Image: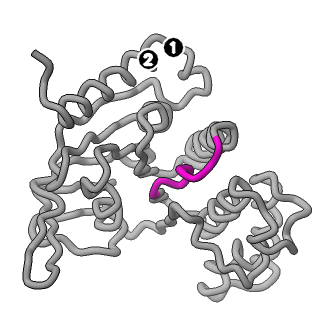
């Protein structure tokens, strides 16, 4: 569904050109799950924004088959504080001009699916961080996307909430067969949620390795030997990038 060929990206600031990404090439199959991981500042979010069409590359091409609907979930939720949960979730459908009864039915279904029944009239400030992120997820899912882009959506949550929402993301991917692209700093999260893991170098970000991770997709995967092996493999790759190979 997504193909990236020799993509470069740079930003100019006060006359200086800063290279962000260099020679990025990979492909993601339809209904696949891909996690992007790397050191802080390596260009992970910039790469996600390129895939989502929010940035344009300096060189290279990004090809997405067909004209799929896409949804994006941001790190800090991106909810409108003056809108209720119901209004936030239904915003995309409203902007598309959907009928009110369809919006209402879709939103009610998502409230139940996300475990938010009874909170529809609340405002974001009245919710916990985990609940706000579920609202953000429901808003992205309301338009029935075929590709879901996620930029460190769980980074600000406590460990228990993070694990619960990881399971929710996994369930959404399996049940709705959405192609998912996840940026994360967490090695364990990348291995749990990404059947394909792209490891970026320090800036300018280059692909150090693409790790196949076919075991992802099961809640029991965390307890398997392969899960621990792949976590250790990623940890070793990132450690060598940070400090150089051990003697």
Q: Nearer the viewer, residue 25 or 232?
A: 232
Q: Nearer the viewer, residue 71 or 226?
A: 226
Q: Is residue 98 above or below residue 217?
A: below
Q: Which residues are magenta?
A: 151-158
State whether residue 102 is above or below residue 147.
below
Q: Is residue 177 above or below residue 112?
A: above
Q: Residue at x 45, y 46 (%)?
A: 31
Q: Position of residue 44 (x, y in %)?
A: 31, 55
Q: Left or right? Give the position of 34 relative to 84.
A: left
Please state if 176 lies on the left or on the right of 38 as rendered. right
User: Which label belongs to residue 108?
Assistant: none
Left or right: residue 172 compared with residue 121? left
- Corner quadrant of residue 222: top right
The residue carrying pointer 1 sits among few (fewer than 14), some (14 to 19) or many (20 or more) residues within 10 Å by Cα, namely few
Residue 151 is left or right of residue 112, and the answer is left
Q: Considering the whole magenta stretch, tell me its main secondary structure.
A: loop
**Residue annotated with mark 2:** 228
Identify the mark at residue 224; answer none if there is no mark: 1
Question: Distance from label 1 to label 2 (Cα)?
Answer: 7 Å
Q: Is residue 156 magenta?
A: yes
Which quadrant of the view contains residue 127?
Answer: bottom right
Give the quadrant of the C terminus: top left
Q: Position of residue 59 (x, y in %)?
A: 9, 68
Nearer to me, 227 or 109: 227
The answer to whether residue 213 of the structure is visible from this angle is yes
- Circle 1 or circle 2, nearest the eye: 2
Q: Camera-side residue: 107 or 82?
A: 82
Q: Are marks 1 and 2 in contact (CB under 8 Å)?
A: yes
């Amino acid at each position: 569904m997504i193909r990236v060929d020799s993509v470069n990206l740079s930003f100019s600031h006060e006359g200086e050109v800063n290279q962000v990404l260099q020679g990025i090439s990979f492909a993601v199959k339809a209904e696949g799950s891909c996690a992007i991981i790397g050191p802080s500042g390596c260009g992970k979010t910039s790469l996600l924004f390129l895939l989502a069409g929010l940035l344009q590359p300096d060189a290279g091409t990004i090809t997405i088959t067909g004209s799929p609907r896409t949804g994006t979930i941001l790190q800090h939720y991106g909810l409108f504080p003056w809108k209720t949960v119901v209004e936030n979730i239904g915003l995309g459908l409203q902007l598309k001009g959907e009928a009110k009864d369809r919006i209402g039915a879709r939103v009610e279904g998502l409230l139940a699916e996300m475990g938010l029944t009874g909170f529809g009239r609340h405002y974001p400030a009245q919710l916990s961080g985990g609940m706000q992120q579920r609202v953000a997820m429901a808003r992205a899912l309301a338009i029935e996307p075929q590709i879901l882009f996620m930029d460190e959506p769980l980074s600000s949550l406590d460990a228990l909430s993070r694990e619960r929402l990881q399971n929710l993301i996994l369930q959404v991917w399996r049940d709705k067969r959405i192609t998912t692209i996840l940026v994360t700093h967490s090695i364990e999260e990348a291995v749990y949620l990404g059947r394909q893991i792209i490891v970026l170098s320090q800036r300018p970000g280059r692909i150090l390795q693409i790790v196949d991770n076919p075991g992802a997709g099961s809640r029991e995967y965390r307890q398997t030997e392969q899960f621990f092996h792949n976590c250790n493999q990623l940890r070793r790759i990132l450690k060598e990038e940070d400090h150089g190979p051990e003697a």
